[in-house]
Image: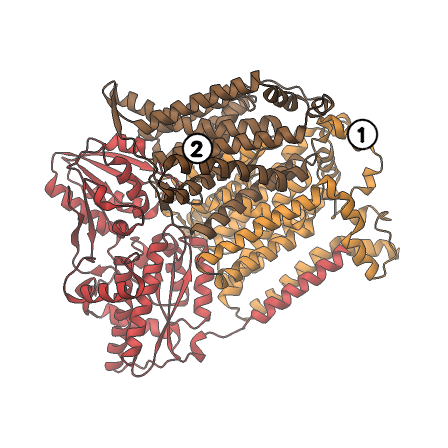
Chain colours: A orange, B red, C brown
Amino acid sequence: MIKFKSIKWNHYINYVVIGLFTLIFGIIALCGGRFDNSMLFLFEKIAISVILALSLSLVVGFLGELSLGHAGFMCVGAYIGGKLAVLLEPVIGDGVLSLILGLIVGGLAAAICGVIIGIPALRLRGDYLAIVTLAFGEIVKSLFQNTSSESFGGALGLETPRFNKNYLFIFAFLLVLLTLAVIQNFIRSRHGRAVTAIRDNEIAARACGINVTKYKLLAFTISAFFAGIAGVLYSFSNYTVQSAKFGYNYSIEILVMVVLGGMGSINGSIIAAALITFLNTKLATVLTGDLAVLQNLLYAVILIIIVIYNNAPALKRFREKYNFSALFDRLLKHRKDPEHPTDDRAKWDVVPTKIEMNEVLSVDVKAQNLDPNREKGGKR
Amino acid sequence: MKNIKFVSFFLALVLCLGLLAGCGSVNYAENNTEFILGVSGPLTGSAAMYGVAVANSAQMAVEEINAAGGLNGVMFKLIATDDMHDATKVSTNYSSMLEAGMQASLGTVTTTPGLEFKNLSADDNVFFLTPSASGDKIPENPNGYQMCFADGNQGKVAADFVSANYAGKTIGVFFKSDDPYSKGIYDQFKANLDQSITIVETSFTDANTTDFSTQIDTLKACEFIFMPIYYTPASLFMTQAKDIVGKKAVYYGCDGFDGIDNIPGFDIATIPQEITMLSHFNSKATDGMAKEFIDKYVARFGQETLNQFGASAYDCVYAIYGAMKKAIDEGAEISVTISASDLCDILMAQFQGGYTLAEGVTGSNISWEASGYVNKGAIKYIIKEAN
Amino acid sequence: MEVILSTLINGLSLGGIYAMIALGYTMVYGIAKMLNFAHGDIIMVGGYVIYVSMALGNPLLAILFAVVFCVLLGMTIEKIAYKPLRGASPLAVLITAIGVSYLLQSLAQIIFGSASKMVTVYEFGMVQFLGVNVQVSALVTLGITVVVMIALTLFVKCTRLGRAMIAVSEDKGAAQLMGINVNGIITVTFAIGSALAALAGLFYLLKAPSISNTLGAMPGIKAFTAAVIGGIGSIPGAMLGGILLGVVECISYKITAIAPYTDAIEFSILIIILLVRPTGFLGKKRREKV
């Protein structure tokens, strides 16, 4: 019974933390406390990044496919949700109702785009999917850029009613909680296990009777939906939506968050998204002029090192020898043997970082895949 | 274990943010010891020439004012932040400047980020007078004013010029279809152009495009080409077009052309065609304030970033200073710790009430309309005659 | 008629550049089975090397330097960033490649600044061709691309090294068993691909004498599109795809109504081709083995 409780606590710790955070700051804001603009903007940006990182994490970390067009889905959400808010403004004002309707419609529009692009694209292998989503992102950007000024604002961008900045962050963090709830529960559900099975070995998954196309599309659509939600949030936290922002570079920025957080780790994505957004905002005022590029350089180097460290076969033994999380465990005198987690469910949010989707296609690694130990030991 | 790390990290983050929170303080200028002006512009990136020019010139104006004793003994200070011509950087820049005690602003240097800035500043009632963000909507709110000509105005002046000189002929237009500045001018140009003139238009989108052979091919027969674009693509177009477009052709640009004669590696003398632009600043002026400004600027920062954006920013600082001074003379209370919002009300009253900058680098008797647009003379400035 | 001809010639010369980049993509993809996102940025590096070494005053020497530098760079990148990941998932390799691409771009910005630099390599001038004024540099670009394509095809078909490449691309394990040095072959492939990228950088400078740190980003993506359209892994396919894309781009820019949508049109072609014929025009169909 006690054990059951402790599992629960572990399971929901991320909700509790974000929830507490929202509650404390929300109460202060609602009681008339005023925060500095810079902090309010930072909260909004962090919430948007976290939602984006969570949604991309579902595709990259758990489905094992690479989407380079996530900013495209966000763009659809931002424009559709923003436009709806503009149209509704004379009818219902720019309050909560407008925000909620915008979120639903913008999210659905992005999800529909996800289905439209997903049905054909998911038939393709990894690299091709990456390039098709990239193409999709560029197409969306270009289409919105060239709309007439009456419809979506064209080159000038769409002017949207900004939500009251003193309270928007509360809704933003509630949306983070919603996103977390949906994505985490999806991953922990039967469907989620099907999705991770596809990632680990598509052919084996298919042989087990999993409808690969259906699950791929499901994960992709959910992901697109939340990217759209982030887009709507963006349009409510800014006065203008300019499609030039939603290019390839922005998609990469989201990808960096997911990769740095550890692919396949929900909490890692949240931390990385929050941290990177925080650093980006703070560094922007410190690193000025041509120094600003140092930041990009740093991200590039960290990205390369982390991916090689986590994925290089030759580094595997090194990692096992100097397992930092195991060392950390031992330091805290935990008896739990890191190699044999007593309860698999408690570890669901740290699903293995390593992704081996196409290994079965090459001859030399086949034997490895059949190793039964991989099932439980497949962790960093 | 992951969870404990997660919790500890998040609590640390909350703590960090908590430290940053200065709840409740409305007047960030409370502890100011000097008047603080702020500007956000592209100090790096493809439009850096403009941002750097504005930051340099404004700094120069501020130092001159301080050397002359400031405003009744109170000094001025300028904060310049880098937005890389990107609208999403503006909210951070704006709030950091405001919280550093900014009391009045020069807004943004370019239009794209300016569209965000105008609303952010309207929320807090912060006065801005932008040297160069020329979008029509920039001075939409009562707190915003422009020192440069609005895009619509530039398009209209250009159209009047073309209608008068090229009636019944065919002219070419080369613009960037996804750029608010370029599209804004072109739309107004097209709307005001004489019906007898036929337009051949061609465009590009990607900012990294360097190859314009198709566009040049389209325009090669035109003897007048209107180019409401920035100097970098314009210089590439001219280099590639020098043997293709007729030697007697005229390239006509707006303020985005400014600085085209100072690009390293681009020798304007090798371009056979005439290059003309609509401007409020003559960078080869031989007398008056413009001459003084040019000499001072070149001596200090060099020739490379000398352009009308800087000249305009120099005037902006003096205009704000002059308006504050006039308000004090008329009996308004302006202390060094005045809040941005209070100062905004005073400055707005001045600018609405017919305040005039008698002598500036970019013109004389500069005044402002109620809409926030500037009232001054434009000059058609020939950068280079046809060879 | 004249309009069609001049558009076609512009398209062919732009297509030549795309084809040159696509050849590099297609070889690396065919043999190392990885999408080298940093390929486009090698073009930019090549351009900057030419920009710097033009100080010596000899264009041919500058080009030589650029090619040598890019070959060494390509081999170094392969050694440091991609080789440790051999056998890891394609996703990991792809993300590393994106990291390398960003690394090159930010390094270039730190060294040369973000403003674009102007450099004139050589001015060829114009010639009359069927009543149309044609840039000689466009013809040079097209000519070199065709020669390179033919040379590469012969190299792959007729030399030991080339046949070893084919073997590696068919089956790495079997090739290794036959005594082929797989790592060596992959390094050679990267070297060839980078040399082609350096040439593409030269072509860009011939077309427009300006270089910035993002020069290679869009062409890189478009050339990959071209490689996919032509059928990835196929050398004539890359040529065909590149030329097709270049011509489409120029025609689209020529028609005022659709000019702003040019990028969208090019990428739509990619999506349509991948749906109708996932292996591209000249690609071989591969069966997935279990």
Compare residues C248 and C237 and report the one nearer the observer: C237
What residue sits 49% from the left and 65% below the top? A37
Q: Is residue B50 left or right of residue C242?
A: left
Residue type marked 2: Ala
Q: Where is residue A297 in the image (x, y as percent from the top left)?
A: 54, 51
Chain identity of mark 2: C
Which quadrant holds the N terminus of chain B?
Answer: bottom right
What secondary structure is marked by label 2?
Answer: helix
Question: Where residue C200 is drawn, which disc sits there?
Answer: 2
Q: Do labels 1 and 2 share a chain?
A: no
Residue type marked 1: Ala
Residue identifier under label 1: A367
Q: In this view, does C204 lie to the left or right of C190?
A: left
Compare residues B293 and B181 and report the one nearer the observer: B293
What residue sits 24% from the left and 59% below the top? B373
Q: In this picture, is C34 found above or below C148? A: below
Q: Where is residue C42 in the image (x, y as percent from the top left)?
A: 49, 38
What secondary structure is marked by label 1?
Answer: helix
